[in-house]
Image (cartoon, rainbow, N blue to C red):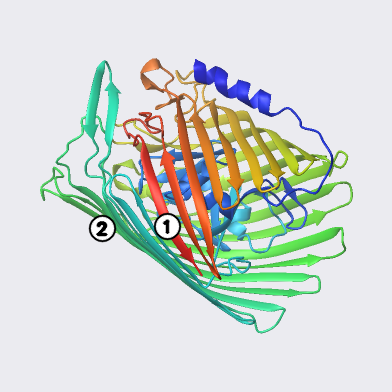
Amino acid sequence: MFLKLYIPTLLIITSCPVFGQEVKPIEEVVISPVNEKENSIRIDLSKDKIQNKLANDLGQILSLLPGLQVKNYGDVGGLKTVSFRSLGAAHTALVQDYSLVSTTQSGQADLSSFPVDFIEKLELITLSPTRTEIPIHAKLAGVVVNVESVHSYVGTNQRNLILGAQAGSFDQYEGYLMLQKRSKKWAGTLTGKIRSYGGAYPYTYLNGNTTIKDRRENNSLQEYFGTASVQFSPSQNHRFQLRISGNDYKKDLAGAVIFYNSNAAQYLNGYGLNGTINHQFKKNRWNVFSSLNYQKNNLQYLDSTYLNTLGYLDSRYYSRQFDLQSQAAYSITEKWGILIGSSLISEELKGKLLVGNPYRNTSESVLGIEWKAIGKILAQVGLQGVFEKRDTVLNSQWNILPAVSWSFDLGSRNKIGMVYRYTCRQPSFNELYYQQIGNTKLKSEKAHIASVRYDLTLPFKRGILQTMIQPFYAYVYDKILAIPTKNLFIWSIQNIGISDAAGVEFTELIQKKMKQHTLGMRINYTFQYTQDISDPKSPTYRHILSYAPLHSGSVELDYTWKKLSFFILTSYLGERYALNQNIPANLLEDYLLLDAGASYTQKLNQSELTLRLTVNNITNKQYNYINYFVMPGTHFNIRLQYAL
């Protein structure tokens, strides 16, 4: 009850406007509600905000953005997926350095496999019809998470060398390296990281009336990441880039804690390889971007104690994805802009347990416009053709995917905007074929998404206040969900019918400079009510969907003084149901987490040395986001980095 009263009260108090003498916004501002220059609607986080968290992966960072729900199945290396406004995770497109990040098999990115050590900027984009560097497939998704690293064209990191090491609780050790060389026409960047984790953290879990105290077992991890990129600019008008990246991992699968067998020997091993070639042409009013991308992913699931005639289970899957695209944007006048583009994506999955070798070819075209006459209008329409083989049956499907937004100023400090889009996502190969959970009868999931957005910017003496309030509504039919319909531990994928989600997103940033001191506060809050409205005769009619919390949010306080910086972060996740049946037995309790951190940077001629320390879950809260997948209590990370 305390948490339910505390969060709304805090938001009301902190949303009161602050007035004062008007000055220019300070540089630390990280919320960019409407960006005229980049022709999109977005919110972003800066590099310093990201690096100070010492986050294990991209999933921990995305949980700070409004409207995003990160499903967390474990600590370091545990599966993490992101969804937008309770849509399926495949409605959220993850773009890294102009390339769509996805695996052919899962159809979505495992955020635990993306370290944040080299990220320069992170954006949450609602609509971007005339930005050529955003892939077409991402443009047609429900929302875009755009990540720019040191390998991007516009990378701002001018360092030649970054070398770092990190250690943390439960035998966590990491090391990373960046080498970079830039000249007038050439730039080469090499990054790499190695990470190991023991994962034997203690936990307390309440099973009925019995309190279980134990230590997580079979939870170790070994991972390697590497990326190399070369950029060449023969003239001011042309830029070419070649980028190759890969990762290799070996994970123990700890599984659910209830009825857990500590002698279980289950493993997930795999590796991925990604190669990309980009070309950008800019001249006068033209902006043309073309790319060619190839992805290869191998996955092995090994259960050494599986009860079958062999005495073990060794499932292997081999997936390939090839995509190419080209987009051309032209500024007709200062108020008119247009973009056209086409792409082709080819996906294939192979495995011994599959009936045939399923494949999918997707053809997509987009027409986007920008019109700055009465306010600002962004609009796009996409044509998507899907041709696939399921089992031994050939299928085809065509979709028209429109999106439009209108935003305008209400004076010099207020803005308001409205957005509508229709999006359609195909079931992933995992959802169709993986083990016992696959369902080859799945239909594509469609969604109508609408929102109204209000932005307020109030500069005051050596500071600024920014507020965003965004009510939204989403109507989804043929929704795809993983539900334990066979038993508690074997889930299956189903189209549950129709659902809708209504809610509001709230973001506020306050920053103040005082000589050598900088104070800041950022608040994110999301309320959403997501319910099943498929069949009025169903016992779950108007029940809240599984793992869709009503309330979630975070409050962060920052303080910087000379070479020192500190932060305190409070994160809250409300009650949610483990299943679609809204009964007390399925209700998971809410939780409030408290993290804190500090960093110190010492200049050494042309180099610098940075020490960072974070303490997570200071109150040692025993919690789990997914039922029976317990999370660690209090733990720390310490990092030492040298940059030249």
Q: Is residue 111 above or below residue 477?
A: below
Mark 2: amino acid: Lys
Please state which amino acid type lies under the numbered disc 1. Leu
**Residue 153's quadrant in the figure?**
bottom right
Label 1 vs label 2: CA separation?
Answer: 46 Å
The residue shown at (36%, 47%) is: 76
Residue 88 visible? The answer is yes
SS under mark 2: loop
In the displayed structure, 271 sits above or below 457; it is below
Q: Is residue 298 visible?
A: no
x, y percent for residue 427: 46, 47
Q: Is residue 539 left or right of residue 536?
A: left
Q: Which residue is mark 1?
A: 640
| Pointer 2 residue | 352
Rendering coords of residue 264 (x, y %): 17, 42
Residue visible at 79% across and 40% down? 460
Nearest to the observer: residue 297 or residue 601: 601
Q: Nearer the viewer, mark 1 or mark 2?
A: 1
Residue 396's tag is: none
N-terminal-most mark, 1 or 2: 2
Q: Is residue 610 left or right of residue 470?
A: left
